[in-house]
Image: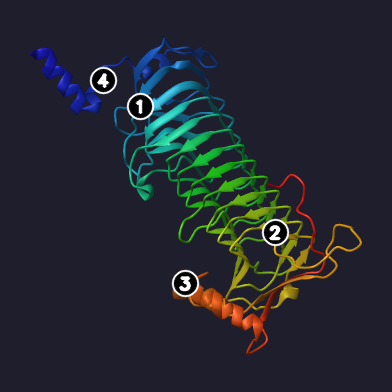
């Protein structure tokens, strides 16, 4: 009977469970500066603090249980390496940013760890030139908005976030964190796959983002490069596969954006000279391929593919002046011209006009009826016998006649 009562107590009290494990902190304290700690396989009690340069290598056989309070592992040092651990059971405080790893320092490596059952995954605060690589991160089970960020960078520069597997967290967030690189990560079933806020000169490359409300959003962050990312099934009501907002001189090149509410959402740079370059991207099977909001120009669009979108391009509260953007050499699957000299370029320009469908572009409540039989009929009648000249949204003087090779 006593054993049963003890067992029930351990189940009801995570702190008691954690206290039953040997202390990881004692092993860390016994490791000399510059030394390597190889804990024996098993479960150890956290939270633990690393305050000097050491290596902790769990070999994939060591679990650290935070006991349901605070961050499981806190690193306040430079040059620390943490790998091969499972970090679990953090606290649940958003105010304290309870995380699997809370990092303050430079030149650290957090790699090949499993981080689950934690509110936040890895949180960097004023931490520069660190490497976060090949970690598997899951948040605590909760409503989407109540989860924590899988990876959070705050006032942190020149970090590499590479090859991490992220699922069922809230966001990957960069705040006031310039010159970071996010490469080859897989992010699924989250809110913002990647969210940059006042984080210029960052590179987002070869990431896979699937079933997030929004794929990548770049907000108040200039000179950000989105390169060769794959974004699928971003179906949030106000979301998009890719988005540039209040950000200048951005580049989106070689991305594949498929089956999203909006493939790419963009507003205009404050200064028209600070152009956004959209080149070689594929927008396919989206409700809207590209949506410009408050359009005043400032975009260069070359070599993109628009395939099977319900609407290739829309403009919300824009000027309607197609000359303010530079369109050239894009592929349009509804192009109705010819290529008589077989040079791969259409003989006539591709032009996109707004007829009655302008109703849903400018009246938010009418968007519910987009592509309904009524609006389709109005649009057909307007094209057949327009009451007034339709607005030209874009003119591509040299459209590609054939779909670029390698784009499915």
Q: Which mark is residue 47?
A: 1
Check contact, mark 4 vs mark 2: CB within 8 A.
no
The residue sitting at 71% across, 70% down in the picture is 272
The percent coordinates of residue 377 (x first, y second) are: 55, 78
Q: Earlier in the sequence, mark 2 or mark 1?
A: 1
The percent coordinates of residue 86 (x first, y second) are: 42, 23
Badge 3 element: helix
Q: Nearer the viewer, mark 3 or mark 2?
A: 3
Q: Earlier in the sequence, mark 1 or mark 3?
A: 1
Does residue 156 show up? no
Q: Which mark is residue 19?
A: 4
* CA distance for labels 3 and 2: 35 Å
The percent coordinates of residue 404 (x first, y second) are: 77, 51
Residue 27: image quadrant is top left
Check contact, mark 1 vs mark 3: CB within 8 A.
no
Badge 4 element: helix
Mark 3 sits on what residue?
A: 369
The residue sitting at 46% across, 56% down in the picture is 236
The extreme left residue here reads: 1
Mark 2 sits on what residue?
A: 249
Q: Earlier in the sequence, mark 3 or mark 4?
A: 4
The residue sitting at 24% across, 26% down in the picture is 15
* Up-down relation of residue 397 to residue 377 (above or below): above
């Amino acid at each position: 009977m006593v054993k049963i009562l003890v067992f029930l107590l351990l189940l009801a009290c995570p702190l008691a469970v954690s206290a039953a494990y040997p202390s990881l902190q004692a092993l860390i304290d016994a490791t000399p500066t510059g030394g390597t700690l190889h804990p024996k396989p098993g479960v150890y009690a956290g939270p633990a603090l690393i305050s000097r340069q050491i290596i902790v290598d769990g070999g994939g056989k060591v679990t650290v249980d935070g006991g349901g309070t605070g961050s499981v592992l806190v690193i306040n040092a430079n040059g620390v390496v943490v790998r091969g651990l499972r970090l679990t059971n953090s606290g649940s405080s958003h105010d304290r940013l309870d995380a699997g790893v809370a990092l303050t320092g430079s030149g650290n490596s957090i790699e090949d760890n499993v981080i689950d059952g934690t509110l936040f995954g890895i949180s960097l605060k004023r931490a520069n030139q660190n490497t976060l690589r090949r970690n598997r991160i899951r948040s605590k089970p909760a409503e989407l908005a109540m989860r924590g960020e899988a990876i959070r960078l705050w006032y942190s520069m020149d970090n590499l976030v590479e090859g991490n597997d992220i699922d069922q967290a809230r966001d990957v967030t960069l705040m006031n964190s310039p010159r970071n690189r996010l490469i080859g990560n897989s992010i699924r079933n989250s809110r913002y796959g990647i969210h940059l806020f006042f984080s210029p000169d960052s590179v987002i490359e070869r990431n896979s983002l699937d079933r997030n409300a929004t794929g990548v959003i770049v907000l108040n962050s200039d000179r950000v490069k989105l390169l060769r990312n794959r974004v699928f099934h971003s179906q949030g009501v106000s979301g998009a596969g890719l988005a540039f907002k209040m950000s200048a001189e951005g580049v989106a090149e070689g991305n594949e954006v498929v089956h999203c509410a909006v493939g790419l959402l963009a507003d205009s740079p404050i200064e028209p000279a600070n152009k956004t370059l959209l080149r070689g991207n594929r927008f396919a099977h989206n409700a809207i391929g590209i949506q410009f909001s408050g359009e005043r120009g400032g975009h260069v669009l070359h070599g993109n593919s628009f395939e099977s979108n319900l609407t290739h391009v829309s403009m919300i509260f824009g000027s309607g002046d197609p000359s303010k953007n530079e369109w050239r050499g894009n592929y349009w699957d509804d192009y109705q011209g010819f290529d008589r000299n077989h040079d791969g370029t259409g003989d006539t320009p591709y032009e996109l006009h707004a007829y009655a469908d302008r109703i849903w572009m400018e009246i938010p409540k009418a968007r519910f009826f987009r592509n309904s039989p009524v609006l389709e009929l109005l649009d057909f009648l307007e094209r057949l016998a327009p009451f007034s000249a339709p607005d030209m949204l874009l003119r591509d003087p040299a459209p590609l006649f054939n779909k670029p090779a390698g784009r499915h």
